[in-house]
Image (spheres, rainbow, N blue to C red):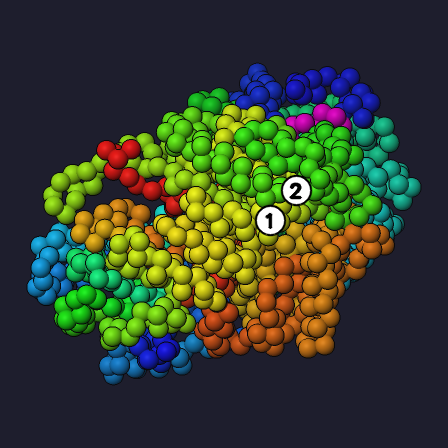
Amino acid sequence: MFKAIDVLDPAFIEQPLATLWQQISPLYSADEEQVLRELMPLAEPRGDELARIEARATRLIEQVRADDGAIHMIDALLLEYSLDTREGILLMCLAEALMRIPDADTADALIRDKLSIADWKRHLSQSDSLLVNASTWGLLLTGKVVTLDEREDGTPAGIINRLVNRLSEPVIRKVMQQAMKIMGHQFVLGRDMPEASKRGREYRERGYTYSFDMLGEAALTEADAQHYFDDYVRAIEHVGAMPAIGPSPKPSVSIKLSALHPRYENFQRERVMSELAERVLLLIRRARPLGVALTIDAEEADRLELSLALFEQLYRDDATRGWDGFGLVVQAYSKRALPVLAWLAALSREVGDRIPVRLVKGAYWDSEIKLCQQRGLDGYPVFTRKEATDVSYLACARFLLSEQVRGLIWPQFASHNAHTVAAIMTLAEHADFEFQRLHGMGDALYDQVLEQAGVAVRIYAPVGNHKDLLPYLVRRLLENGANSSFVHRLVDQRCPISDLVQHPWQVLSGRSTLHNPNIPLPRDIYGSERQASQGPNVLIQSQWQPFAARVDRFMGYCWQADPIINGSRETGSALQSDVRSPANRDNLVGQVSWAGAEQVARAIDVAEAFLPQWQQSDVSARAAAICRLGDLLEEHLEEFVALCHQEAGKTVQDGIDEVREAVDFCRYYPNQAEALFAEPLQLEQLDGRTTHWQRQGRGIFVCISPWNFPLAIFLGQISAALVAGNCVIAKPAEQTSLVAARAIELMLEAGIPGGAIQLLPGDGATVGARLTADPRIAGVAFTGSTETAQRINRALSQRDGEPATLIAETGGQNAMIVDSTALPEQVIKDAVMSGFASAGQRCSALRILCVQNDIAERIIELLKGAMAELRVGEPSLLSTDVGPVIDETAQRGLLAHIERMQKEARLIAQTPLPAHADKGYFVPPTAIEISRIDQIGREQFGPIVHLLRYEARDLDKLIDQINAAGYGLTLGIHSRNERTAMHIEARARVGNTYINRNQIGAVVGVQPFGGQGLSGTGPKAGGPHYVPRFTRLIPVDAQ
Amino acid sequence: MTDHQFFGPEAASVFETWNRRGFAARCDLLGGALAQLPLCADHEEQSRLLPRLLDRARLLDQPIELPGPTGESNELYETARGLTLVVGSDSATPRALAGQLFAALACGNPVIFSAEPEPEWGSRLVTLLHQVGVPRGVLVCADNAPLETLLQLPSLTLVAPVCRPEELIRIQRPLAERDGLLVQLAAETDPDGCTTLLQPDHLHRFLTEKTRTINTTAVGGNATLLELGSSAP
């Protein structure tokens, strides 16, 4: 563990850079308690620091509160509409979306959606701010007007109300758009640099300076990246030409790397280190002669290591050497913040140029937490308590202000917290640093600082269109608008000053735990019920490197699959086939021995013989064995990832997700079964008698699984059937028999008896048909095509006796509906992920992207650009986004469809294939614009997305068309209008609907998965009704 | 024979309205018929069975909230499967037929009801249900249409027969021969005891599940999590 206190030893930063670098990555998700225990001594006030900081902070707050102009409009808005009120959230939501909606009807609908359901009256006259009260009146009246048409009773009053509403809509829309512009104006310094420098002049005359930020979110396309690059160049040139004003230091420019390259991510490391580096160097070459300092903004935690590597490369470049104007931002909420600063100090010491470093608290906290939980990581990269971040900030500050760092790093302390500011001023024994604040916030606080501290204050000021501002604005408001935020409490006279000047070290020391017990670790998000599956973060060096090395050990391995009957592998079959990688047919992966008719018969005999014993076994013993299997799968993660690469053509993340899903099944179903079997069920009969019933497995279940989830669906079906007390005969897809065989070996190792599970690799004619014709089979769990499900159903119905249970999960023709309130960049990310991840070979994958005509051109433009950035290739490479399809039959069918569509529809874009593509079964990701859904025909199980435009007024017709296709598996909806989203969701006859996100990757027990109509029979896999379907209730006496 | 012959051209929108009415509202409405059920031999058993089914169906109104990552809401709920054929064989009893019918309707399905071997009683029951508010477009009598014909209705999604176990094959085979979706069977094979109808799993057979996942951070941010960040003791 990194010894934090050691950083104060001047010798610490004299260590080799590589040694210091090694300290950074392991802290990514290190134990929070341990990290904080290390940091606490650095943040702990020494001597009389505590009293001095408190006194200084108290004075600052008193002065701020005494300042009549302290509460600016935006502060007042935040105070009144904090984000713990429904109105606050609705206001932010409206602010985020309204300005980008091109069509009036949809804009009006969004205003109705957001304004009509809130209680604006509650906020009336609560604030001293004229603007807030005026806004509240406006919102109240608007809210009233927009709800008038809810009375559709046909009475004269109702009709008049609707007319009033209809007539007033354009006015309301204009007023709301104006209101949003006013809000934007508070946070954006100017729409362009001339306007920004004009507005900023007054502040500069008072001694402030600026760091200009060009508004815009991450670029998704090369065209967007070029556009942002041009903006930065213009900004640099403008700032370079700005005259010196009084004591105000020269302004600088902040750069967001994600805006300069469409793939600024570790997956595309080589491109980042070459293409992006070259682009930033161009900016450095422009900025340096003009004396304009550049700062690289901090972004998500996954990009930190990449950004540092890039920074080092650029910093060492001749273009930068000898210049102390190239800096970066470090986020104190990161567990890696202090070792990053130590490494930067050492880097500066070695190279000799001072590095400006802005220390911020961090703006992506909520999304970092969410992402880690979704990906099952072993911890968080950020602290989970606000006061822990403050402690980290002060620990970092003490280091940055230490004598040995002076001259190596130019600290820029960014905070709106009066206590933090007071602490910095107290800790500093020199004036070689500056403060930074955001434009539109903390004016009164920093007016005092400027007066008292004798150090520079730089304002971080966004420049750009109001439309681009809004996502930024919402992030700032979320960051500062929550009740707990200091900014919020600073201006709230009701909050005692004594509460605001508590030292975070004291606050944290007084907590029962250093970490936040309300935020469980990713593995604990299901509480005591079960542990979530885990996976490594492949974007973090300390996790990726050992993982990749272990996967590599299996990449040359040759696996063998045989029938497994009664726990024994049946080797030596005459029916053997080689297995070759779908990514490269030259690559031999293993051999499969296929089961013959005799083995099918014997497997059924064995299962039948063992059935009574298995049915009578204790459910907890069955559950424990399946849980053990889950643990074994996690232990063998790397082997299965290698197998998934080699046999199924899965990419790195897909391979990890595959194993994680299987593990989740192995932990979810046992819990379900234990609860289900716990007590006999009491039922009162019609004659008044009370009878007792007990669950029992139905008998022998055949599990027929697909190749697209060779481990997860395979084991999902089997584990549910087994834990419910059925004996299972598994027939995996022929294409992925190696994965299946290895899984069954582990299952036996986990303690499932050989009599309970039989494995029969083979084709449908030899194995499947014989199994489904046998009257001893009580049920079939099947995932695959609708046609095969029908064949199985017919075969089962031809038998005499009790009908067998058939649980079938079949195909889909999945749509995503996008209206004009949606954020186009988010739509594209989600559509590309939903349509092309796993080469489109997911049941849930997007096939029809339905886009409201008003935004279709922009969506198409972004889709083209994003597809140009995709990388198709060898699935085991981290840089590969899209791997091969499963086999030649699939490839031929998909290519034929693309060819037909090119004639009958309009090709939008096609991602190029790599040079070696002819060695494998690759299909280029393709987007095609169609005019009718029925042009597509049957489901195309591959990387093909069809785009269909629709008019806003025809939304219901569109839903009818989607329903009429008969499939009903997944649906994506992108809309900021919650009523629209819920209306679509309610009307669409689909099993899984995903709103404002991608539509793949259902999580066991979280998003039970399965469709209706042609897409399946139900019950949903990974849901509470699945295991019961593998059981029947029998009277206790009959047992 | 087409579905329109039974339900008319507005069938789809009538079904949708019925389905969206909610379990509790439908159960309230069906409950209005309990006091006036047409007399038959097992009237008393019906009076015991049907309220229990409605009580159980009422509980299905509440979606199941599923645990998951922060910033996302996940709910599982159930909705009508679709056009349902409730049909009896010679061994069927009114209590079991009424049970299957009430189960299908309470779950929001449109129903074609063939009340063999008690067609007159069945007809009176259907009339009563119309009187208490079940839309005519949602519930119709099979009007002596042969079973083989009914089993081929294009929109059929579920058959809820009342028969002996050995009689099921007569229904299952023609269903399996159909193209399109796999029509489900939700049989009561104990016409007297109605033991299947009394079991907790049975209603689910009339329903299909829907999962609704919302990225709550896209509309309004993750304020809840932000609050959690500082509220812990």
Asked if A581 appears above or below A333 in the picture, the reply is below
- What label does residue A766 carry, if any? 1
Q: List the single residue furthest toward the front.
A: A598
Q: Are marks 1 and 2 on the same chain?
A: yes
**Image spot of residue A764 (x, y percent):** 59, 51
Magenta portion: prevailing SS class: helix
Residue wearing tag 2? A594
For the point 61% across and 77% down, which residue is it?
Answer: A931
**Image spot of residue B183 (x, y percent):** 40, 61
Report how many numbered discs are placed on residues in the image.
2
The foreground one among A25 and B136 is B136
Which residues are drawn in magenta?
A21-28
The foreground one among A753 and A813 is A753
Secondary structure, mark 2, is loop
For the point 14% across and 64% down, which residue is it?
Answer: B33
For the point 78% across and 52% down, which residue is it?
Answer: A920
For the point 72% across and 29% down, which residue is it?
Answer: A550
The amino acid beneath tag 2 is: Trp
**Image spot of residue A269 (x, y percent):** 78, 43
Question: Would residue A833 appear left or right of A523 to someone viewing this image?
Answer: right
Q: Quadrant of the N terminus of chain A?
A: top right
Chain label for disc 1: A
The amino acid beneath tag 1 is: Thr
Question: Would residue A760 appear left or right of A179 to someone viewing this image?
Answer: right
Location of residue A47 (image quadrant): top right
Q: Is residue A24 magenta?
A: yes
Confirm or deny contact between disc 1 and disc 2 (CB under 8 A): yes
Q: Is residue A100 magenta?
A: no
The earlier-in-sequence mark between 1 and 2 is 2
